[in-house]
Amino acid sequence: MEPSPGAFSFGPRNELAGSGAILVRDSRASIPLTKVLTGDSSWIVMLVPTPATESSISPYQPLAEAIDKRHPGQTHFHYYTPKGGFTGVHTRFIKHPLCKVIIIIIQGAILEGQKQPLGVAETALVACGDRTHVILACDNIYQTQLDASEFPTIIKIHSLSELDVEAAANLLFGQPSSRPSSGVQVQSLMIAPKVWPIETIYQTGSGPPPSDFDAIYRLWIECLPPTFALPPDTLQCLLWRDGFARHYVVREEGTRQILGFCATYYTFADSGGQRLVGCLSAILVAPSCRNMGIGLSLHNHALQALRSLGGVYRLKLGSIFPRLLYGIPLNSPFEGWFRRRGWTMDDQRSGSSQIASDWVITFDQWQGVNISPAGLVFRHCQPVEFNMALDFVSQETLGKNDGWYDEYAKLEEGQHVSDIIMGLEGNNTVATAIVYTAGNSTCAAEDLPWMNNAGNDIGGHKLMILKGDDPAMRNGRSSVVTRLLNACATALVERGARGMFLDAMKDSGQTLRSLGFQEYATYRDAWREI
């Protein structure tokens, strides 16, 4: 998912050669800081990135001295560490009653494993409440995009040299600068977000696939990591899908070139056939056309359209079926963008914002071949058992796994009931899952493209459903999961598969690692209620 926030981005490094400090944005009229720094007791909290190299002299020493000369109160410097990013220590200082101003320095290349500096700035913005929030951004992070429509105050400097930080301090405290202006106008550095006209490029029943698919496919390849690359015919099959699909584009005036694309789906939540889930499945914006409000326009239009559908009771960031991306990839640089648009990323309740992962294993690494049945029987579902299996699916997924019932029900249409693996304890169904292999024309294989990316001859497993808490059950959850996976692996080996791909698994990481699985991709499962 690649949003295109209305943003400010840094140009090439030589654009500001010789310049001092430029006030790029001050939407809350926070400058000068003397408006809020009253008396000697007020604090400034500064969050600075950990230096790339060790030195006895901090690279932020000139900045500290420049601030201290102008601010009689305390200034607290805190590193945001390479691994930890924004921590509880930072929060305690920011929320201290004496803290009036938070300044975040964004500077330098991101080290391997280091938190995205904009993520730290976004978290600080949320934590600071009504306190003054300032970003001091150095020119040498020109690859990074700052969403100027979201951060209230942004100051841009060329470097952390004594001359440049003196210019920044003069600007912060409303003192005249001793350096000449660079002559660069703020308007030339920013592209204001705007509302773009949205075109519905595809909806169910709208006719043949549009000729614009090639442009959309290029966006997919340009905007997503290699993990999520798909062959053109696979992506086209996922997008131009009879059923519940509606997709949008933003075009350039005159040329009609596609600049941005948004995919949405809606699906029945459960067996009742009344409630729908709307899925904001992907937002793609050409890298050269970002920072112009295209992604925001697509996002807002798509949500409004999904909300307007009768029966839609909740929205998902990502897709259920067909599966483009299950959710926003974990640690995506655009996670903060979605947070600020109302998507909750920290709610760990079921069906809210849990972490879900795809897993893969080749059977030469499989550690489960000698697992004993433990009183459980696993077998392929027979046609006479199909309704019993559906009743179990309906009961166990209601309110927990939207869209799963239909995926099971569709197996009857293509006579693929035997793709369901059932786990029974006595006469009671305690678990189900669906297995599938490439090229067998089942809805499972058509709806889930990622198995083929994981390797040749890999089979798939999806929609594991376990019976809820039941005192009568003799086997615990972990035991059932392990043995169900073993049964699915056996079924796939019988079909010639040499490995297994698991789709969007939650809460089973320890068990899966013990069996030899490797994580393929990880997502945040984010939802919004209507």
Image (cartoon, grey):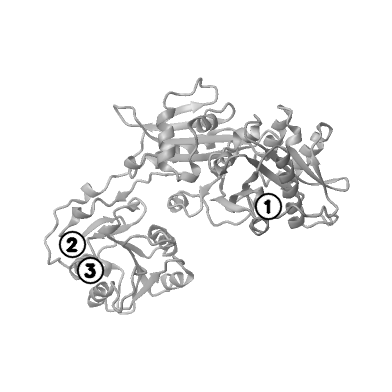
- Residue in the foreground of this view, choosing between 114 and 300: 114
Task: Identify the residue at image location x=42%, y=32%.
Answer: 216
Q: Earlier in the sequence, mark 1 or mark 3?
A: 3
Q: Where is residue 292 in the image (x, y as percent from the top left)?
A: 33, 42
- Residue in the foreground of this view, choosing between 309 and 161: 161
CA distance separating discs 2 and 1: 61 Å
* Image disc number at residue 366: 1
Q: Which element is circle 3 on? A: helix
Image quadrant assignment for residue 447? top right
List the residue tagged with mark 2.
20
* Image disc number at residue 169: 3
Task: Identify the residue at image location x=43%, y=50%.
Answer: 334
Left or right: 105, with 460 as reference point: left
Q: Name, please, the residue furthest toward the front.
A: 364
Image quadrant assignment for residue 321? top right
Left or right: 481, with 459 as reference point: right
CA distance separating discs 1 and 3: 61 Å
Q: Name, please, the residue furthest toward the top.
A: 207
Q: Which of marks 2 and 1 is nearer the N terminus?
A: 2
Task: Identify the residue at image location x=86%, y=53%.
Answer: 375
Tell us which disc is closer to us: 1 or 3. Answer: 1
Identify whether 411 is placed above or below 299: above
Amino acid type shown at disc 3: Ala
Q: Which of marks 3 and 2 is nearer the N terminus?
A: 2
CA distance separating discs 3 and 2: 10 Å
